[in-house]
């Protein structure tokens, strides 16, 4: 389970991190898969649009990032049913999260998966819910 703050490190040169690169390398080597809310399919393209407008990308970088993102085989999960929505609201209220962040927490909790995030508030919430926030990467 991975959120947009973590995925963003793969694309924005000024946000790259060693841990983000290790996770991406593990994915490319077939050692890691990602379950994510459908929301990620909107958040990352929006990140690209914002980065282009703020000149963090040029046009070539914008299109290259979009192509790479399209090739990543995320396992998208729909959270539009009433049970998921109620759980998201519960987590949002309990941990003072946005509905967007609560969507990641809800899915990680429901699937009992580690949640990789760089968002401190979401990280604290995941830990409060006894979710793992790291993954062990074996070569």
Image (cartoon, grey):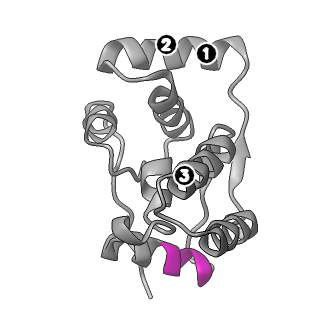
The answer for how far apart the CA atoms under marks 1 and 2 are is: 6 Å
Q: Residues within 10 Å of mark 1 (few under 14, many from 20)?
A: some
Prevailing SS of the magenta stretch: helix
Q: Which residues are magenta?
A: 24-29
Q: Secondary structure at mark 1?
A: helix
Given residues 58 and 119, the one toward you in this image is 58
Q: Which residue is mark 3?
A: 53
Labels 3 and 1: the sequence-earlier one: 3
Quarter holding residue 66: bottom right
| Nearer-the-camera pick, 6 or 59 | 59
List x then y, in percent, for residue 126: 34, 37
**In the picture, which quadrant includes the C terminus?**
bottom left
Secondary structure category for the residue under label 2: helix
Q: Position of residue 104 (x, y in %)?
A: 51, 37
Q: Residue at x 60, y 80 (%)?
A: 28
Q: Is residue 46 above or below residue 103?
A: below
Label 3 crowding class (10 Å Cα cut-off): few <14, some 14-19, many 20+?
Answer: few
17 falls in the magenta region: no
The vertical placement of 107 against 15, above or below, is above
Q: Are marks 1 and 2 in contact (CB under 8 Å)?
A: yes
> Which residue is label 1 attached to?
85
| Residue 24 shown left or right of residue 67 in the figure | left
Q: Is residue 114 visible?
A: no
Q: Which mark is residue 89?
A: 2
Marks 2/3: CA distance? 32 Å
Inter-mark Cα distance, 3 to 1:
32 Å
Residue 88 locus on image (x, y percent): 52, 19
Q: Secondary structure at mark 3?
A: helix
* Residue 25 lies in the magenta-colored region: yes
Question: At x 53% / y 66%, what residue is drawn?
Answer: 57
Q: Is residue 45 above or below residue 64?
A: above
């Amino acid at each position: 389970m991975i959120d947009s703050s973590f995925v963003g490190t793969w694309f924005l040169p000024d946000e790259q991190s060693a841990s983000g690169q290790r996770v991406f390398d593990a994915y490319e080597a077939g050692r890691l898969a990602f379950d994510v809310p459908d929301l990620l399919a909107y958040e990352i393209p929006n990140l690209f649009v914002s980065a282009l407008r703020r000149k963090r990308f040029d046009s070539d970088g914008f299109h290259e990032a979009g192509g790479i993102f399209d090739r990543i085989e995320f396992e998208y999960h729909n959270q539009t049913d009433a049970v998921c929505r109620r759980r998201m609201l519960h987590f949002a209220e309990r941990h003072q999260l946005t509905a967007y962040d609560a969507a990641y927490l809800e899915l990680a909790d429901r699937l009992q998966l580690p949640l990789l995030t760089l968002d401190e508030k979401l990280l604290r919430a995941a830990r409060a819910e006894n979710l793992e926030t790291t993954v062990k990467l074996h070569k």
